[in-house]
Image (cartoon, helix red, strand yellow):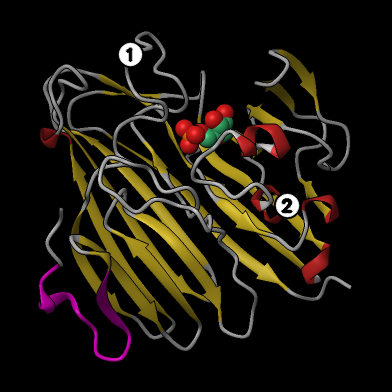
């Protein structure tokens, strides 16, 4: 259970708090450019819709909103590692920050966007999980674009290695009518076949897809033809991009995803995956970020 943030963070007619279930607060944002919802659980943004546009972020109709359970959808924050723990398989997939409550630190009204900052402090987890005192601070700028910056800070006196991802679920009209561009010629690790390959041209979807693109800082673009739009995913502090769709069988095996939900989303994740990790000396920081913009002129 988490208590609702103090009223002092509210911004009249622009930012307020609600509870999805008792003890499960969310931050609601509505300004002239967009509306958004951020759960304190995992600092997971679960809704972003620019004014006059289709939703950009997908959240499963069967998502479970409960402490200790990551949200199926939105932008889960995989931290401080991506995927399986590199050396200890008893540790949770995608780290331990996405299923715990974060603390709201600040809210600010700007001319063209609303800014929200939350923090996660590793002192709330057991030493066995992560002994070095580390904090993660995430800042959302919600406007015509959605900007998300995740900054890790090593507050201990020994060096740490940080990985992770902004595991974004994008809402699309239909998976068979989508292409992802910007990865041509980039090598990838295929987590379905456990083989390596190199992308040729646009990426399209006809089966379970789970690819970790390596050594790429490129902006990717999702061509969402069914909605006549392009979603641009720019990034910083990231040399890996993950593209995922569970398709039919995997979806059927996931309790928090509807059987047909795979048709309506694609994950394009701004990552620090596999070798793309950062060793931080005491006091050092690393920022992983993405800026998402939509252009609706695709015809
Ligand atoms: O980012 C893609 C991926 O690593 C896939 O392998 C798949 O497992 C997905 O994340 C979801 O992971 P989750 O732990 O949320 O079920």
Q: Which mark is residue 210?
A: none
Mark 1 CB within 8 Å of ligand 1: no
Q: In what element is the residue under mark 2? A: helix
Quarter of the image with the C terminus is bottom right
Q: In what element is the residue under mark 1? A: loop
Q: Which residue is at 15% across, 67% downward?
A: 4
**Residue 239 seen by the camera:** no
Question: Relative to the observer, which residue lies in front, 122 or 161?
Answer: 122
Q: Which residue is at 49% across, 45% downward?
A: 256
From the viewer's perspective, tell me whether residue 13 is left or right of residue 245: left
**Vertically, is 213 above or below 66?**
above
From the viewer's perspective, tell me whether residue 242 is left or right of residue 87: right
Verify whether residue 13 appears in magenta. yes
Which residue in the structure is indicated by mark 2? 263
**Residue 238 seen by the camera:** yes
Which residue in the structure is indicated by mark 1? 90
Q: Residue furthest top?
A: 87
Whole-percent x and y of residue 144? Answer: 54, 76
**Vertically, is 78 above or below 221?**
above
**From which residue to which does the magenta span run?**
5-19
Verify whether residue 77 appears in magenta. no
Question: Relative to the observer, which residue lies in front, 128 or 18?
Answer: 18
Q: Which residue is at 25% across, 46% downward?
A: 67
Whole-percent x and y of residue 147? Answer: 47, 61
Whole-percent x and y of residue 183? Answer: 76, 38
Whole-percent x and y of residue 289? Answer: 46, 48
- Crowd tier of the residue under label 2, counting other residues whose Cα lies within 10 Å: few below 14, some 14–19, many 20 or above: many
Mark 2 CB within 8 Å of ligand 1: no
Q: Which residue is at 68% across, 47% downward?
A: 262
């Amino acid at each position: 259970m988490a208590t609702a943030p103090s009223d002092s963070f509210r911004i009249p007619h622009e930012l307020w708090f609600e509870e999805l279930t008792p003890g499960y607060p969310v931050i609601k944002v509505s300004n002239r450019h967009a509306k958004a919802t951020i759960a304190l659980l995992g600092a997971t943004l679960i809704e972003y819709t620019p004014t006059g546009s289709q939703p950009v972020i997908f959240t499963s109709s069967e998502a479970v909103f409960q402490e200790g359970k990551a949200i199926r959808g939105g932008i889960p924050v995989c931290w401080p590692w991506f995927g399986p723990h590199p050396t200890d398989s008893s540790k949770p997939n995608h780290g331990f920050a996405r299923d715990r409550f974060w603390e709201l630190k600040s809210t600010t009204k700007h001319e063209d966007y609303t800014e929200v900052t939350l923090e996660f402090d590793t002192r709330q987890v057991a030493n066995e999980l992560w002994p070095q005192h580390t904090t993660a601070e995430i800042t959302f700028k919600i406007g015509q674009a959605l900007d998300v910056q995740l900054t890790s800070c090593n507050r201990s006196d020994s060096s740490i290695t940080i990985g992770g991802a902004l595991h974004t679920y994008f809402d699309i009209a239909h998976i068979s009518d989508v292409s992802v561009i910007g990865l041509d010629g980039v090598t990838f690790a295929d987590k379905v076949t456990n083989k390596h390959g190199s992308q040729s041209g646009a990426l399209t979807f006809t089966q379970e897809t789970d690819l970790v693109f390596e050594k790429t800082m490129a902006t990717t673009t999702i061509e969402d033809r069914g909605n006549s739009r392009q979603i641009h995913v720019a990034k910083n502090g990231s040399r890996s991009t993950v593209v995922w769709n569970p398709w039919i069988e995997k979806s059927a095996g996931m309790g928090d995803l509807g059987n047909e939900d795979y048709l309506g989303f694609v994950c394009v994740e701004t990552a620090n995956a596999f070798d793309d990790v950062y060793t931080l000396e005491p006091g050092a920081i690393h920022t992983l970020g993405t800026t998402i913009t939509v252009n609706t002129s695709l015809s």
